[in-house]
Image (cartoon, rainbow, N blue to C red):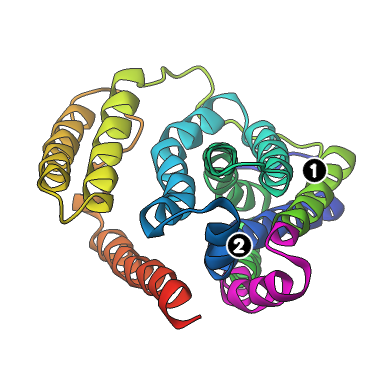
Amino acid sequence: MAQTPSLTKVSKSTVLLVTSLAGFVTPFIASSINLALPSIGKEFSMDAVMLGWIATAYLLTAVVFLVPLGRLADMYGRKKLFLWGTVIFTFASCLSALSWSSAVLIISRVIQGIGSAMIFGTGTAMLTSAFPPGERGRAMGINLAAVYIGLSLGPFIGGLLTQYSGWRSIFWLNSAVGLVAVVATLWKLRAEWADARGEKFDLIGSVIYGLGIIAVIYGFASLPDIWGIGWAAIGVIVIIVFVIWERRVPSPVLDVRLFGNNRVFAFSNLAAFISYSATFAVAFILSLYLQ
């Protein structure tokens, strides 16, 4: 895609800055909050199952909305959805910090997950749109480094903040970084990208996808209860229906043919799935049973 004249060096730097800030803060909150779970559980009298939903509510919402919102960003503007995602994420971080009950905290985590989906569904796409092929590797490398720095520093900084300032300070830190990203986007970033403008949105496919993901994750979160096995099985069936549907519609919300036509893409996603599954599971267990 040709670069627009308005996309100056400053604009490209702004895209890299705001996407890297957002790329840092979203995995940071996911990994840092694990260290605060015992403190949160003590304050709100929550057991291990309820504490699990503090992490699960965020991840579940992010996964459910990631694909549909990414598609909407292609249709209506990636910067627009990125900006709103950062605003929602920052607002939810403030609400989490001010939570007066476990229910409010979990609800705020759901809202935070929606914002995170809007950020991750647009950040990388903005980079590939803003930078020409010869510069994309460096830009995406910096952005990916920010993501893993946030993921790696989360437990360390989260532990320090929880120890000396309380668990709410983790969310206040996220709010501050998110606010910087919002201001930078509004102040410096003028370009917009919408490669699929005018195309139809696959609402039915999005609903099927969301229901399948919810059933699978809810089922696994309820194990070893027999209902958990049932929900997981239903979720797998719904996801199979989703794949069949997406192969038939002219404008799919997710082009599932990519997984069959591009083995590198398919196996890279599989490796990432296995890696993140192990990482998040271990982090949750270590937080509860080794502190």
Where's residue 40, x and y in %?
A: 58, 58
Where's residue 120, x and y in %?
A: 55, 48
Where's residue 74, x and y in %?
A: 53, 32
In space, the residues marked 2 and 1 are separated at their CA atoms by: 23 Å
Where's residue 200, x and y in %?
A: 41, 17
What range is drawn magenta here? 148-170
Question: SS class of the residue under badge 2?
Answer: helix
- Residue type, label 1: Val
Labelled pair 2, 1 in contact (Cβ < 8 Å): no
Kindly give the residue lying farthest to the right in the view shown. Answer: 187
- Residue 169 colored magenta? yes
Q: To which residue does mark 2 refer? A: 136
Q: Residue at x 33, y 65 (%)?
A: 277
Q: To which residue does mark 1 refer? A: 182
Q: Which residue is more in the foreground, 272 or 253?
A: 272
From the image, which quarter does the N terminus lie in?
top right
Mark 1: few, some, or many residues within 10 Å (few <14, many ≥20)? many
Q: Which residue is drawn at 41% across and 50% down?
A: 50
Could you say which quadrant of the image residue 282 lies in? bottom left
Q: Can residue 132 be seen in this view?
A: yes
